[in-house]
Amino acid sequence: MIWQVADLLRGDFKPAEYGRVILPFTVLRRLDAVLAPTRAKVLKEKEKWESKGIDAMPFMEKAAGLKFVNTSDFTLKGVLGDPDNLTQNLSAYINAFSPAARDIFDHFRFTEQTDRLAKANLLYLVLEKFISFDLSDKTVDNHQMGQVFEELIRKFSEASNETAGEHFTPREVIRLMVNLIFAEDDSLLTPGNAAVRTIYDPTAGTGGMLSVAEEFLLDHNPDARLTMFGQELNPESYAICKADMLIRNQDVSNIRLGNTLSDDELADHKFDYMLSNPPFGVEWKKVEKAVRAEHEKLGYDGRFGPGLPRISDGSMLFLLHLVHKMRPAKDGGARFGIVLNGSPLFTGAAGSGESEIRRFVLEEDLVEAIIALPTDMFFNTGIATYVWVLTNRKPKNRKGKVQLIDASSFWQKMRKSLGSKRKEMGEDDITLVTRLFRDAQEARLATITAADGTQTREVVMKGAEPPEASEGGKVRLAPLSRIFRNEEFGYQTITVERPQRGEDGNIVLGQRGKAKGKPMPDSSLRDTENVPLDEDIHTYFKREVLPHAPDAWIDEDKTKIGYEIPFNRYFYVFEPPRPLTEIDADLKEVTAKIMAMLEELSV
C-alpha cells in the first residue's frame, strides 16, 4: 500500500527521489499512530506541570510510556483538516516532537521535501494517503515495521540503481547470527533472570540486527533487558534506525551517525554482544589517513594494532573494531557475530596485514566458529559468505579450538528473487546450524538417494553409524561440522636459497662482511615453502627439499609465520568419475538416437 504513493509522485519526482518522500512520511505516520492512544494523557500532564512552572517532559514521557512525545494540539489528521495552512501546521507538528524525534526528520531533510510537495500541489494528497494507513503497533508490530522499512529501501534502491544490501541484512541471516551469539548463554535466556546486557552494531543500517536480537531475547526471557548501541553512516538509514529505537523505548542517544572506522562515536564503550554485516569488498581509502594514524600511534592500545588489510577491502577492519569493543573477560566477556566474504579466510601471504589479523584472533583464541552460508543469500551479491563467531569467554570444551560448519547446502529457493537474493534459510535450517554449534561436535551430512532418484538428508554425529543405502540407491557422506586446533591454521613460510655458481660451475663465495666465505644466494633460484606450524622447519627441509636440491639452505632471517583458513579444502569430497563402460554405453545410446533422427529426415 505504501509503495503506491509513488504513483502520486510520478512526473514531479524522479524514481530515485521517491524514497526521500515516502520514507520520512512512513516514519511520521508510524510515530503519530504509536502516540495516539496516550495523546490525551500527555497533553493533560503538559498543562498540569507547565502551569506550575515545572518541566513537564519527564511526566509526559511517563504518560506516553515512551522516550518521546508530541506536544502539538494537532494530530496528523488535524493537520490535514486545515488545507489552507497545511505547510505551516505540518511544520509546527514536527517541531512539537521531542528533540530526539525531531532530529530524525532533520536527517531526512523533511522540510525540503514538504516544500517541494506543496509547490507541486501534492502535499495534501500525500498526507491524506498516509493517514489512511493504519501503522499502529497493534496492527503492525515492531518486527513487521522493520521489514516494511527494509522492503521500501530495497524498492527505492532498485529504482535508483543503488545497492539495497548496503542498508540491511536478510532477516533469516540475522536470526541465525542472533541464535549463535546467545546459544551458550543459558542463564541469560532463563525466564525470571532480570539480566541487563548491552548489544552493539557498528554498521547499524535500519537497526534490523539490534531489533531481532531484542525480540529473540524477550521471547525466551521477558524479564531480561537489552540496551542497544549502534553507529550508521547513511543519514536515512540512521534516521529509520533511530525511529525504531524510539518506539522500542531505547535510549536513542546510543545510536550515532558517522563513519565507524575513522570516527568511533562510542570509543569509551565495551559491549556484551555485537553483530555486524560490514560492506563486502569496499575500499577504505576515504578513511585511510585516520586508520593508519591510529595503527601507527596507538598500536595494540587502539583498534588496529595487529595489522591493516589491503586498501581494496576494509571488512577486516570491522573485525578488529569489534574485537576492541569486547567487554574484558574478567568483567564477564563478550561474544559477537560478523558476516564476511571469503577473502578474510585466506587472502594475504605470511606477514601481510590480513594474515597478521588472522594470526592475532587465532593465537588469542578468540575465534569460536565460522559458518559457511549458501550463495545468493544477500540482496546485492551472490558470492559465498561466512558468519564468524568470536568470543573471549570460550567454554572449556572449546578452548584452543575452532569449529567450522558448512551450511552452504541448507537453503530453499525463494518464490520470487529479490535482487541477487534467490535463496533463503528456513527455520529448520537455522535450528540445525544452531544445534551443531551448541553441541560443538563433529558431524557429517548423509545424502540418501533412493532407487527412484528421490533424496533425503540426515545429520550423522561423530561416532554414529551412517544410514545404509536401500536397494538400487546410494548414500553420499560429506563433512558438515569439523573442529580444528588453532595452530592447525598456522604455517611458517621459509625462504629456500641456492648458491650462485661461476662460469666454471663452482659456488661463488661472499668477499666481505657477514657474507665473507659463505655461499652467495642466486635470486633466480630462490623459492619459498609453507611448513605446518606444528612441524619443525629443519625436519621438513631435510625431508622435502634436500633430496631435490642438496646445495640448498634456509635463510632463517626471512622465515615468517602466517595463518589461513582454507575452508573449502576441509569440506571437499572427491567424487570419482563414472566408469568408462557406463559413459561408453550412454554415448552409444545417444549416437543411435541421432542416427535414427537423421534417417527420418532423409526419407
Image (cartoon, grey):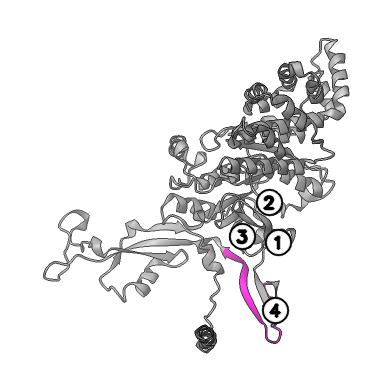
In front: 542, or 42? Answer: 42
Mark number displayed over residue 408: none
Task: Give the mark, 4 or 3, whose residue is nearer the N terminus.
Answer: 3
Residue of label 3: 374
Task: Give the mark, 3 or 1, whose residue is nearer the N terminus.
Answer: 3
Q: Which residues are magenta?
A: 461-484
Residue of label 2: 181
Q: Nearer the viewer, mark 4 or mark 1?
A: 1
Q: Residues within 10 Å of mark 2 (few under 14, many from 20)?
A: many
Q: Nearer the viewer, mark 3 or mark 2?
A: 3
Residue of label 4: 465
Which residue sits furthest left?
A: 504
Q: Residues within 10 Å of mark 4 (few under 14, many from 20)?
A: few
Q: Amino acid at mark 3?
A: Pro
Task: Give the mark, 2 or 4, whose residue is nearer the N terminus.
Answer: 2
Residue of label 1: 429
Q: Which image quadrant is residue 33 in? A: top right
Helix, strand or loop under label 3: loop
Task: Give the mark, 3 or 2, whose residue is nearer the N terminus.
Answer: 2
